[in-house]
Image (cartoon, helix red, strand yellow):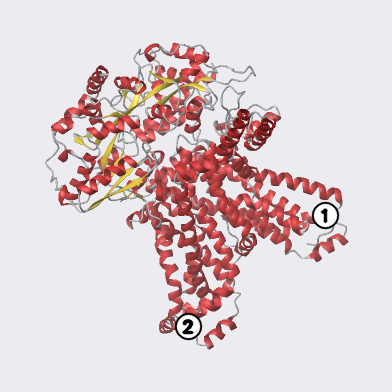
Amino acid sequence: MKNVLKKSVLTLASLGLAASVLAGCNGDAEEAGNADEFKGKITIWDGPRWPDKDDNKYHWLEAKIKEYEEAHDGVEVELVQVPWAEMGDKLGVAIAGKSWPDIAPVDISGSSVSIDHIEQGVIEPLDAYFDKDAKADFYENALDAYTYDGKMYGIPNAITLHSMLLNLDLFEEAGVTPPEGGEWTYDEFLDAAKKLTFDRDGDGKTDVYGFSTYVLPGYYESWPFFYKNGGSPLNEDMTEFTFDDPETVQAIQDLADLKLKENAAPETLGGNDVGGTFQAWANEEQRTVAMQPWATWAIGAAQGKYPTNFAVANYPTGKSDKPVTIGGVGGWVMFHQDEDANKKAAVADFMKFISTDKEQFVMAQNYGIFPARISASEMDPFKDNPEMTRAMEMSDQVVMLPRHPEWQKIDEAIQTQLQLVFNGEKTAEEAMADAKKTVDELLK
Amino acid sequence: MTQIPMGAVPKKDNEKLKVLKKPNKNVFLQMKKNYSAYLFLLPKLILFVLFVAIPVIWAFVLSFQEYKIFGSEFVGLDNYIKVFQSEAFLVALKNTLLFTVVTVPFSVLSALVIASMIFVLGKVSQSFFRSAFYLPTVTSMVIIAMVWRWMYNYEFGLFNYILGWFGIEQINWLGQSSSALWALIIMQCLIPFGVGIIMYLASMGSISHSLYEAARMDGASSFKQWLHITIPLLKPTTLYLVLLSTIGSFQVFTQIIMMTGGGPGNATETLVHLIYKTGFRDFEFGLAAAQSVVLFVIILIFSIIQFRVLRHDE
Amino acid sequence: MKKKPLDKVNKLILYVLLTIFAVVSLLPLYWVFSTSLQLNSYQSQDMERPVSYVDSNPPKMYPMGIPLYFEHWGEARDAAKSGDAKEEAYHRDMMDHIVDNTFSSYENLFKKNDVGKWFFNSFYIAVVVTFGILLLDAMAGYVLAKKKFPGRNLIFWVIISTMMIPGQVTLVPLFIMVGNLDLMNTHWALILPDLSMVFGVFLMRQFMYSIPDELLEAAKMDGASEWRTFWTVVLPLAKPGLAALGIFTFMNVWNSFLWPIIVLNSSKLYTLPVGLKTLQDANLASFKLLMSGAAVSAIPMIIVFILFQRYFVKGLTLGGVKE
């Protein structure tokens, strides 16, 4: 376990050096304010996390708020509960309506809160509250995700990534051996998917399919498949769309052909039904799909609410021979504050209060995410959790999405074209050529 | 939600306009005398100014601006140029037009046919069927969209099962461009036009018996009577219903966001969904305002044309 | 139109056709309730794996709990007769399971989701707006119809002309305004714009014309104040119009969707339609749960409709309202 962690630490550190150099130096000496002198209200948004015994999914933050309020007379923290599926849209709307909260959980790389907002001054830099030593406890790529123009725009809280989840019962039923160590090539994956597609009761209808996933703006479960031959959506300096290179086009077509040619995936592959897809894999009464890629929260769900006998595996490798997955970094962000420096300090103080190593450890254990603090990882949150440990090993395969101010629109242009590939209306080549037109326009 | 007035406003109003033209002194006197009337109007007026009048004017102003969180700037006609140059808008316009052109005639015609069928029944059956057709329309579109999405489900949906009875292969209704918009159109057509049925029934009730008596004397069949007496006399109602459902169908939104999100690709993108996306996902307020002004103008033009056509061939 | 008696064959055809149409139009609502009560986990002794009748192909046309319950009930009775206590207990357990599972999603909705809160929010907002609209629009409609004062026609025409403008036009500016007034993520953001809807003013004005001037004069003679006249003479006379307007306002507010999804952030403040959307967006919701939510949201409007049917008809024919 320790080894895995060390390895992850190292590889995470090796990612994205350029910006982290800048992140290292301290921001300008701003008036830091005095948190203790602040009296008033702090508003924080959060989504549902893990439930307590009364099924309250906000109990963790509620308890922290209570604790903080008791320690700080005159400070009131208001929690606004926002479902995760709405969080991005709602934050965007709140920003546009200038009614943002003080704190919200945001992945600033390519979601509703973007570089564009940072440039407009909606997000407060936190450098005044974190010295070099305080920053050193965060994994560099986690910190990097919150660094722009040399300033730190949030406290990294958790690292997430996507992995393949394999239903071992179905593997056994079909007589397929799961990939050794969770490592496989695309051909091996294809072979498994075909064998895992079978007619259980002999009525001529397929009961179980090998693979499924969906394609929807803002969701990246299927994307590592498109990176398998070494491609990426944009070139390095983000001036050009590159998902249309022949290798990537081939990778996209391969996955679509899993349904269109090999019939090893259900008709709904590449559709937009997130819930239905998950149910098909996890729900005891269904289990009609053997393999699906999901973000790490699904590991928690398959260990808890939907008990499933499953294993975690890498995405299959293609021509680049290197397994790839897409990851993200979640964290707390402070929104634009008016002149009150004391309030700003108090908000930062509360943000620190909920992102200590202890809190990140608790969250990692209960919520299926990887801590962004090195010290929290060293507390070994996944000691008794082989699936999470396996997923964590994949952190050295993580690539981040391009951080372009217009990413949301670029993403939508690509994903809507991908949908047309998966329902067989366009070839991958045609679709990516069409996507290129829109995306290159946005990149100008 | 839209509402438009039915029928003309009483003529009396025009006479009252004279009040305004009287000399100033008199006006002040009149105003003083009637201060209580202003007090009665005041609460509604304040709300109206704040939440209707100012926003309407503001929308036009915004459509010439680029909105930024800290300070906006005027950009002339840029937004309008963008609207007509963007493929997304043209696709949304095309989809919305197709949706309207199919569903409006179908809805109004089917309301007319069903109302005519109900009308000849006895009182009890009449009110029973009237309720049966109106009931589905009191529930919110959110619910209707949720259940239709479920009925259109590829694997477990009711429709693919029913198609199976006729030996037709499963259809990925909402999942492919060729069928997605039509799935929404079919859905709209099969939701009864309850308002239409009730209004037709009411109008039919007010047609004088003597007209039919006379026609029967001349030996006209029931169908002929329907065609030559009922339909022409129902024309004002028809006009109203066509306008009403056209306006409604240009604003189709809830089905889109609940069932397809505009996809696959942009096969089911509609104008209002695009406005919503431009405004509240991309936050290009100026552009969204311009799009909504264009929508308003399109609806206005359509209304005028329909008004002219349906009035003309009287 | 005079009704002449139809001959029997024609009548039969008419009834058959209308019944078919009615079934088609009511089918979706039936499907909401049927799915919400469908058994989604069932495993009898002789079944290898549990099955769900919700996600089943072919779909089940009615809640399977009903026949299965009676089946087990019969078996339990037979087992009791033959003295097989173990078998009887098994069937009794299965009967309990079937009942539990049939209603499980409704329990789940209120216990594990905020549906109770959403229901309350929708309800109280609809009630507040309805009564607010009735009062404000009756006041405005009354003076616009019965009083002569400078500016009356100007005000009326300005108000009426905005009725032609689709709501989407004001979406963005209204949003900015609500933000500036610091009303985002509050119920005021829903209530105030709803209260400013102008259709009721038009409707009430039309209605108020029918009140005889003599009655108003008589009240004035008795020395009643304007407010008293309005309250004791005008409002009672306007009751049928108020009932119609009230019902449509309630329905519109209860069902409104586009604006609430924009201005409400906190899930505690959601109204039912917004909440239903988030249920659908959440990854783990089953169709049984979604349809239960839809049913909970549909039931109040169905009750209102059944209770006040005649006002619906009246409201539609009075002024032409569209939902």
Badge 2 element: loop
**In the foreground, B301 or B289:** B289
Asked if C41 appears above or below A95 in the picture, the reply is above
In percent of width and height, residue C153 lies at: 50, 72
Amino acid on which the number 1 mark rests in the picture: Ser
Give how far apart the Cα atoms at labels 1 and 2 are. Answer: 58 Å
Q: Label 1 crowding class (10 Å Cα cut-off): few <14, some 14-19, many 20+?
A: few
Residue ID at (19%, 28%): A20
**In the foreground, C134 or B91:** C134
**In the foreground, C83 or A440:** C83
> Mark 1 sits on what residue?
B222
Residue ID at (26%, 24%): A380
Badge 1 element: helix
Disc nearest the viewer among 1 and 2 = 2
The chain containing the residue under callout 1 comes to B
Residue B4 visible in the displayed image? no
Q: Name which quarter of the figure residue B11 lies in.
A: bottom right
Amino acid on which the number 2 mark rests in the picture: Ser
Question: Is the same chain shared between marks 1 and 2?
Answer: no
In percent of width and height, residue B67 lies at: 33, 48
Numbered label attached to residue A283: none
For the C terminus of chain A, the quadrant is top left
In percent of width and height, residue A357 lies at: 22, 32
> Mark 2 sits on what residue?
C225
Q: Label 2 crowding class (10 Å Cα cut-off): few <14, some 14-19, many 20+?
A: few
Asked if C8 appears above or below A383 in the picture, the reply is below
For the N terminus of chain A, the quadrant is top left
Q: In this view, does A19 lie to the left or right of A384?
A: left
